[in-house]
Amino acid sequence: MKILIFLLLTTITLSVAGQNKTTATRTKNTIPIDIGDSKEMIIQKAANVVPTKNQYEALKNEFIAFIHFGPNTFTRMEWGNGLEDPKIFDLKELHTDQWCEAIKSAGMKMVIITVKHHDGFVLWQSRYTKHGIMSTDYKNGKGDILKDLSASCKKYGLKLGVYLSPADLYQIENPAGLYGNLSKYTKRTIPRVVPGRPFVNKKTFEFEADDYNEYFMNQLYELLTEYGRIDEVWFDGAHPKTKGGQQYNYMAWKKLINTLAPNAVIFGKEDIRWCGNEAGKTRNTEWNVIPYLEDPKLMNNFADLTEDSLGNRNNLYKGKFLHYQQAETNTSIREGWFYRDDNKQKVRSADDVFDIYERSTGGNSTFLLNIPPNRDGKFSSTDVQVLNEVGKRIKETYGKNLLSKASGPKEILDQNTSTYLLNNNQVLLSTPSPITINRLVIQEAIATHGERVELHALDAWINNQWKEIAKGTNIGYKRILRFPEITSGKFRIRILKSRAIPAISNITAHYYISRPPQIQFSRDLNGFVKLTPFEQEFNWKPHGEHAAQNLSTDVQIYYTTDGTEPTSSSLKYTQPFLINSREVKAVSYSKNVKGSVNTSLFGMTKSHWKILNGSSEKQSRNSPPNAIDENDRTYWHSKEGSIDPIAIDLGKLTVLKGFAYTPQKENSDGMIQSGIIQISKDGKTWVDAESFEFGNLINDPVRRIHYFKAPIDSQFVRLTPKVIAGDGKTVTIAELDFIEN
């Protein structure tokens, strides 16, 4: 007993001593590194860098919406040129309530809209330009999209933010434009008075500015005083074009924003940074305390930070200032920022969006998802379905805390982020009865103590011993640990490495109900088939993650090769298996719930095949071997204007019963509508074996199979196209398969 008391007192003493040491440095949003600071001192300072009140409130938003809407919606362009006639924005109706209802359903807390993109077209009734909604036929030029959206946000309890592009192609291309017009910096009053359009807000500012900076600040003034509370101002760093060495007076912009919108954070500047990509890719370790060579509070320009590591110890040693600057993980639900169409513009799956949600909000950043309205002023139904499903999963998974009745430190179980436990070793939790979990959420008290944990692990008491279940690096605002489900009544969170005594504010446990994913097939040139959860084809800025695998950690896959329906009693997939000219059926199970069966017919193995001829438009990417490489994302593309045959040596005399043609999906070029299969005894002299025809390829570019009327014996085969879909004058083949009898 005496030994136990001694150890307890020693622990308390060490904890207090450590606490005094780490609090010797006052917490601040930016802390300078002094000349002569040791590495230990730099890390101590980093452990005391904290977010501002506005930054912390922005982090608590977690999941927010982006809306790109403008002339590009109607021209189907990603970037306009500033020369568009405003009437191109041919909007007939607007449904901002529908937007906000879907956004609210998804669990988002704020909407940011592009009130002016790079083309310079404005979506509100600005006093300072005619290049915008006021020059369209929508509501006879009286429409105001921002006004309607602001009203809808209030109705649905959503915060509002505005994206105002510093780049402005209209002000560059217009002969009377203000961007880069070489005007002098003089004292200007913001806002500039416009007869007949007085402001209710009478606050004015005096700034040294040129014509474009005055124009920009006049518009900022309108946005921040006439549309209710603004919680984020979004400055894009992209510039399609510049002129006249135009510079931005950001220090003046900041003063105006901080005065008129005191609750707003500023994206692209010292408050919030870009995550470094537009794909939804997240860093494994996302530190928000990062080094700068200048004081961020005084900087006018902020470079994009795209490196894999920004705030590890070695990064921090190179800085002169340590600053809290959180990341927004931004991407689009569609292939592109603006809506183009419902047929060819793919939409992310609910699996993909939910996976990004967990990786971003559970990886110490904010998830900003773009949903572009269509030309009817609505979110398309597919987008809404995805948002509803994602919101359902978030509520289903994180709406119930499975540690609500647990025993342990009350400071971390009360779900109050303002309370915390100072502990430099471990946290023990127990539940009245065993619980089954596959998610654990951990938060640090960053508002008062900064980011400190560098490495941590979760253990569960299983079979009378501790078993490590998951491990993570930093925590920060929030870390979501994902792992295969486990059942236990005792859990241990170990802090393996930290910059100072950690202040843990919140721990909750959850269960994600896995959806049995559809199975997809792939095969290598040697004929070995691999079965994996279906990965959606999404060709815009790929993030490299496999959402279905990330989410479905408890999935088992079963398959058959004899034509029967697979069940949990069929062959269990554990590794790639060899298949030659056979049909494979596969199904996934999760918690005894059966998914849908998927089937694929495989042709001959191709390791010994050789291309005998075939022209190529681009030898490096579109050469003939791409047609037989077992990869339908590569393809052969003949020379333009040349509808060439492609001949193959199968390596041996083979009895064939059919072939399969997979068209490329990048565009509609070269799809073979009809042709002839020819055979040869020597690969030189050819005779017709059978003709074939495929329909509706352009609208439905999926794999097509043609079975021969009678088996064909040959070692050498040639496909000779006759008609190309859409009267094309070139040939493309993503994959060509021959099926052995």
Image (cartoon, rainbow, N blue to C red):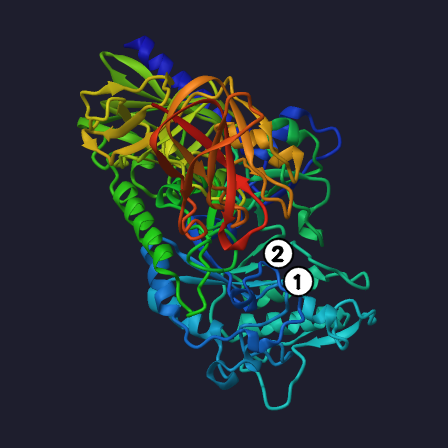
* Amino acid under disc 1: Pro
Q: Residues within 10 Å of mark 1 (few under 14, many from 20)?
A: many
Q: Residue furthest bottom?
A: 196
Picture residue at 39% right of the left edge, 44% below the top: 418
- 524 relative to 270, above or below: above
The picture places residue 687, in percent across and down from the top left corner, at: 49, 31
288 to the left or right of 470: right
Residue on which the image places disc 2? 236
308 to the left or right of 61: right
Q: Residues within 10 Å of mark 2 (few under 14, many from 20)?
A: some
- 524 relative to 417, above or below: above
Q: Nearer the viewer, residue 590 or 394?
A: 590
The answer to whether any part of residue 555 appears in the image is no
Q: Secondary structure at mark 2?
A: loop
Residue on which the image places disc 1? 166
Image marks 2 and 1: residues in contact by CB distance under 8 Å:
yes
Give the total of numbered labels: 2
Image quadrant containing the N terminus = top left
- 250 relative to 687, above or below: below
The answer to whether any part of residue 182 appears in the image is yes
* Amino acid under disc 2: Asp
178 to the left or right of 484: right
Q: Nearer the viewer, residue 73 or 571?
A: 571
